[in-house]
Each structure stands twice: as structure tokens, then as C-alpha cells.
Amino acid sequence: WSKLPLFTTPTQFFESSGVVTLLFAMHFAIFPIERAMRDREGFTQVVAKATWFTAAANVAFGCLGFAFFGTETSSVVLDNITSGTITELVRLFLVVDMIVSAPIVLSSLREIAETNLLGPKAG
């Protein structure tokens, strides 16, 4: 544990800012999901359970990555895997995922900004 850095260089900080920003904004995507539900009762419990499950899965994934790769673990998960056709396909699918996911997240942020700047919609 003593070899793990607590702080990073400014370059590494700015390289990670895109992912950090997306992860910070991701929770705004739950608002359209809640509005689309017929029965909104119990929504809070479902979100809490999903959040805890996701957190536990992320911690387990991080611990397994550290156990297998030690301090040689790259912050970019795909860098830990040898290059090849499969890795390149996974990278391609991740790009497609980001392109498709970004409008969903940004639409919620736009709606929140519109409501706060222009007031709620009439009707």
C-alpha cells in the first residue's frame, strides 16, 4: 500500500477529468427514468439498492485488479490486457457506448438548467 500515490500529476489529473465529469453527471439520468415509471412508489429503494450493488461491484473489480496486477495496474483497464483484435473491438464498443450515453446524461442536465434559468414549463 505504501507504493500507491495519494496525489497525481497535473497532466494525469486533466487526462481523467472527462471520465470524472461523466461519472459525476451520470446520476442525473435517473430523473427521466423516474418520470417514465407508471408506479413511482419504491423508486428511492430501487435506486439505493442499485447504487449499493454497483458500488460493491466496482470495489470488487478494483480489488481483483489490484490482486492480479498489483501496483502495475493501469488506470485504463484495457491497458492491462494484451493488445489484439478483441481489445480493439472492446475499445470501439466503448466509444460507441460513450457517444450513445452522453446525450442521455446531457438531456437531464439541460432540463435542470432550463428549469432553473427559465422557470418551470407551463402546462
Image (cartoon, rainbow, N blue to C red):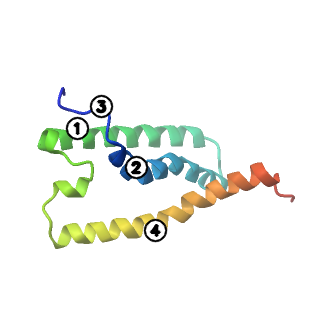
Q: Report which residue position mark 3 lands on.
A: 6
Tell me the kind of residue under disc 2: Phe
* Foreground label between 4 and 3: 3
Task: Give whichever of discs 3 and 1 has the lower sequence position.
Answer: 3
Q: Secondary structure at mark 3?
A: loop
Disc 3 marks a residue whose amino acid type is Leu
Residue 19 in the image, given as x and y percentages of width and height = 41, 52
Q: Say which label, 1 or 2, has the lower sequence index.
A: 2
Residue at horizontal 56%, vertical 53%?
Answer: 29
Distance of label 2 from label 3 (alpha carbons)? 16 Å
Disc 3 crowd, CA 10 A, few/some/many (<14, 14-19, 20+): few
Tell me if label 3 and label 1 are in contact, CB under 8 Å: no
Task: Please count the marks in the image.
Answer: 4
Q: What residue does disc 2 label?
A: 14
Q: Position of residue 15 (x, y in %)?
A: 37, 52
Specify the amino acid type for callout 4. Ile
Give the spatial CA distance, label 3 vs label 1. 17 Å
Q: Is residue 96 left or right of residue 112?
A: left
State yes or no: discs 4 and 3 in contact (Cβ < 8 Å).
Answer: no
Q: Are marks 4 and 2 in contact (CB under 8 Å)?
A: no
